[in-house]
Amino acid sequence: MSIRNTLIAALAVLGILSGCRGAGLKMSYSSADISTTEDEHTMLAGFAARNDLHDGIHQHIYTHCLVLGDGVQKVCIISNDLMEISPALSDTIRTMIAEKSGLAKDNILMHNIHTHSAPRSGGWCNVPGGPNRAWKDRMVGIVTENAVKTIQAEGKPFTLEIGRGRTAINGNRCEKGGPVDHDVYVARFLQKGKPVVSIVNLACHPVCMGPSSYLLSSDYPGVNARYLSEAWGGEVFQLTGAAGNMDPALGPKDAAYAEQCGKELADSLVNISFSKVPSKGLLRIVNETVDLPYQIDVITPEAVRRHADSLAAAAKTVFPRFADDVRGWEEEILGRFEEGPVPSKLRYHLHGVDLDGVIFFFSDGEPFCEYQMEARAAFPDRTVFFAGYTNGQNSYLPSARAYEVRKGYEYEVEQMHVYIKAPYPLSERMPSVYREGVIKTINETIAAE
C-alpha cells in the first residue's frame, strides 16, 4: 500500500473513532416499584422503638437506575428508597447485576436514601419464615432486573442541567446551633428538551415519620419528588448527602410532617435557575479506598474484653439495657476471632464520577455534613454532588467537631460501634483520614479528565 493510501486509511479509521466519540454521552433510565404487597406486613427499619409490623402505605417506594455511557464504558447509578443495605448484601446484588449485564461491578454504584420507613433488609425478620423474607427476596430481584434492563437498553443523547437551591427543612440533630448544610443541588437530564429524570442532593435524614409511624414510605424525598415531577415533568429521585448529623428541623414526627417538609423542599426548588452543562463527551469513574483508624492500633480479644468491661461499668449513665447490649456486642466480636484476625482498621470505599465536568462523589456509611461542605469548599469552581449510603452501610463518620464537643454526639462517638457491631470505636484521628480520602478521590476524578 502506498504512503498516500496508508494515510487515507489511517485518517478514515480516526474519522470513525472520532465519530463514535463525537456522538456524545448517552443515558438510559428506568424505575420500578419495590413496595410491599397489600397483604404483606413487615418490620420497618431505623427505629428500635417500633415493636409491631407496618400497617399501611403512605407512599410507594422505588428503585431508580440511571446509566450513563460514552460509547466505550458505562456507569450505573442506582438509588433505592430504602434505609440501608448491608455491605455483604450490596455486594451480592451488584455482583448479580454485573454477571447478568456484563458491566463491571466497580462501575455499579448502589445508593439508598436512608428512609426509616422502608422494610428492613437484614436481621431476624429476614430469616426463612421471617415477616420480611418474601419482600426482601422480591426486592433483590426487582432491583437487579431493573438495573440489568437499564444497562442493556440502548442509550440516547441527553442534555444535562444543574441548579442549586436552599432549604430550611433540615437542622443539626445532635447539637443545637451546630453545623448545618442547607444547600440543595439538582441535576436534570433532558432528552429532546424535556426532563427525563432529575436528581436532588440534600443532607437530611428522611425521618419525618418517627417511631410512632407504622406506614411504609420514602418520607420527605418521595413527597418532594411527587411535587417536582408534576411541575418539571419526568421522574425525580434523591441522593441523600452527608446526613449523619442532619435531621428534619423539628425531628421525627409523622406522615403529615413528611408531607410538609417534602412540599417545602419542592417549593424551594421548583423555580430555581438551571445552567446547561457544555457537552464534552466526558465520563470518568474513580474507585478508591481509605482505611479509618480505631482508637487502638491492633484489635485483640483482650482489648475487646477490657473495653466491654469499661462500657458495662458505665452503663447506668447511658440507659438501662446498654450493659446487655455491650455484652451482646462483646460476644459477637470475640466470635469473629475464631474465624481469623479481626481487621484493625475500617475500610471505606469512595467513588468519583466525572460527567462533563460535574462531579458526583459517593461514599459508604453516614458522613457528617461538614465533610460535604468541606469537599465543596475545596473545589469552588466545580459542582460537587455528595452522596453517602452507597454500596453498603457500616458506620457513622463523626466530624472533628463532634469529637471536640462530644456532648450531644455521645452515640456517634462512643456508643455506635456496639450497635453496628464494629470491633472498636473510631479514633479522633478518623476525621482527618476520611477527609483526605474524600479530597484525594475527587482530585483523582478531576485529574482523569
Image: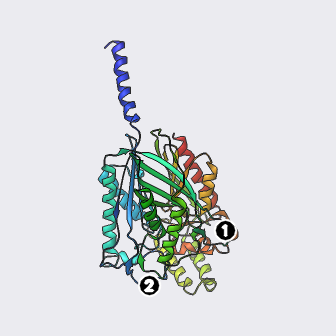
Residue at mark 2: 51
- Residue type indicated by callout 1: Gly
Between disc 1 and disc 2, whose residue precedes?
A: 2
**Which is nearer the eye, 313 or 241?**
241
**Which is nearer the eye, 369 or 300?**
369
Regarding mark 1 in the picture, which secondary structure is present there? loop
Q: Residue 178 carries which label?
A: 1
Q: Residue at position x 59%, y 51% from top?
A: 439
Left or right: 68 in relation to 254: left
Q: Residue at position x 61%, y 45% from top?
A: 381
Q: Residue at position x 38%, y 26% from top?
A: 14
Left or right: 60 in relation to 181: left
- Distance from disc 1 to disc 2, alpha carbons, whole Å, reads 32 Å
Q: Which percent across, then down, holds residue 61?
A: 39, 68
Taking 358 as reference, is 246 above or below it? Answer: below
Q: Which mark is nearer the camera, 1 or 2?
A: 1
Q: Which residue lies furthest to the right in this view?
A: 404
Left or right: 44 in relation to 362: left
Q: Residue 217 carries which label?
A: none
Q: Residues within 10 Å of mark 1 (few under 14, many from 20)?
A: some
Taking 261 as reference, is 184 above or below it? Answer: above
